[in-house]
Amino acid sequence: MSTHDLHQGENMPHLLIRHSCALLTALVLIASTSAGDWRRFHGPNGTGTSSDKIPTKWTAKNILWKKEIPGVGKSSPIVVDGKVYLQSSSKDGSSRTVYCFDVNDGSVKWQKSIPGRKAHTHRLNTLASSTGASDGKNVYFAIWDGQGVAIHAWDLNGKELWKTPLGRFKSQHGPGGSPAVYDGIIYYAFDMDGKSTLYALDVEKGTIKWSKPRKAFRASYSTPFLRPTKGGGNELIILSTAGFSAYEPKSGKLIWDYTWDQEGVVLRTVGCAAYTDGIVVGSSGNGGGSRRVIAVKAGGSGDITQSGLAWKAKKSFPYVPSMIAKDGYFYAVHDKGIAYCFRARDGKEMWKQRLGGNVSSSPVMSGDTIFAPAENGDVYVFKASPKFQMVTTNNLQASFSASPAIGSNRLFLRSRDSLICIG
């Protein structure tokens, strides 16, 4: 979810592969994204990583610009072709607006508003919490008007292309799931209380190419990602309370499925899954502090529930923030401000370190350096290494709940009322 930071409320709420064939496919995926772009929630393919160079220790000169964002929202920024896109809601709930900012000076290049209405959300959620996605030609946003969710498409100059309604959304906390787009198809997990459907829409016309029902529990907010397979293809992997499922991206055919036994406690998935060393890991939780974590051996066919579990856990892992994977290790920042490193193959805890304040944002990584913004305005900087290495802590006198984006060798942070550019 796009920082649906609901870890304090009741019951609320990927890609380094070692063998050469899969690595080649991954490189092709990355090469298809322009340098400096961050086209979906949690970055390229949901990995939260970028090769762009971001300064680690900040002074006033590193704040290149800061622009007020009207209204409220926790939609995280995306970066496409020198522009930054996000959505916001008017304070009275009467409209939702998609903004396009210039990366160089923060000027608004265009904005498009859509009528809406006030609706109930969790106190830590907003009416505009979904992050956009792009294929480099257009931008796509899942927008909730207070009743139903629709996928909207604009070109990069703000021309409206199409709108596809998906129906009413039902949840005690409001929506927050975000789309992803790969090879001409937009994928969106429309997961709510009592109903769950994975949609695939054509980018040109917005028509539904296929849809797959999933077992429904409580609303979940994870965004799908692609995993390269040995044969040179890809499988689309989605996480929810039901478990992990992998689909053939073009047809929607189910390839393999892992059913999650949450041992009598039905929790939500919020952050993205992470993947490395053949292991895909996902966490679920609630505001009361319950956690369930599964690490599954990705691949195979059919029901892998009995054969696919690598390990599981009930503590230490985050509820809302997504994890980062690198070279056989998972890096996590817990909602309470504690950072962890776990070995992917067996879940062994390599280190834990208290950083400070509560964290709702998903951390991001530049090279081998992780940036983790907190609700108190601190941005913790540490190394992705099996031995803990703290770099520094920067404070921007703001409050961060949306997740950052990296693009054009800049870091973009959405605070409660502003968009801040670090470079």
Image (cartoon, helix red, strand yellow):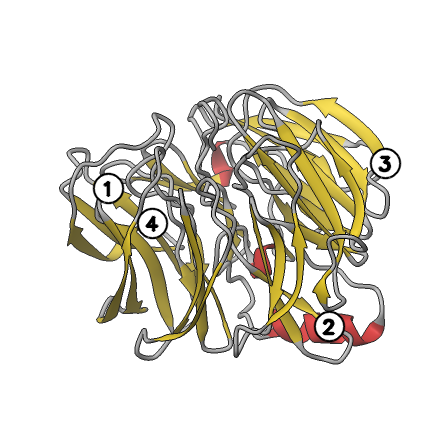
Find residue 298 and report its horizontal and vertical position in percent.
74, 60
* 3D distance between C-alphas at marks 3 and 2: 26 Å
Q: Left or right: where does residue 25 sit relative to residue 277?
A: left
Q: Secondary structure at mark 3?
A: loop
Q: Is there CB contact under 8 Å for labels 4 and 1?
A: no
At 32% across and 76% down in the image, what residue appears?
A: 207
- The first of marks 3 and 2 along the sequence is 2
| Mark 2 nearby-residue class (10 Å; few <14, some 14–19, many ≥20) | some
Q: Position of residue 20 (x, y in %)?
A: 83, 73
Q: Disc 4 versus disc 1: distance between alpha carbons?
A: 19 Å
Between disc 3 and disc 1, the foreground one is 3
Q: Please give the label number shown on residue 135.
A: none
Q: In this view of the protein, can residue 313 be seen by the observer? A: yes
2 or 1: tag closer to the N-terminus: 1
The alpha-carbon separation of the residues under discs 2 and 1 comes to: 40 Å
Q: Which residue is mark 1?
A: 89
Q: Nearer the viewer, mark 4 or mark 1?
A: 1
Query: Of the residues under marks 4 and 3, which one precedes in the sequence?
Result: 4
Residue identified by numbered label 3: 348
Position above or below: 262 against 143: above
Amino acid at dot 3: Lys
CB atoms of marks 3 and 2 within 8 Å: no
Secondary structure type for disc 1: strand
Name which residue type carries label 1. Answer: Ser
Q: Which residue does the image show at 71% across and 54% down from the upper left? A: 275
Residue identifier under label 4 = 106
Q: How many residues crowd mark 3 within 10 Å: few (<14), some (14–19), many (20+)? A: few
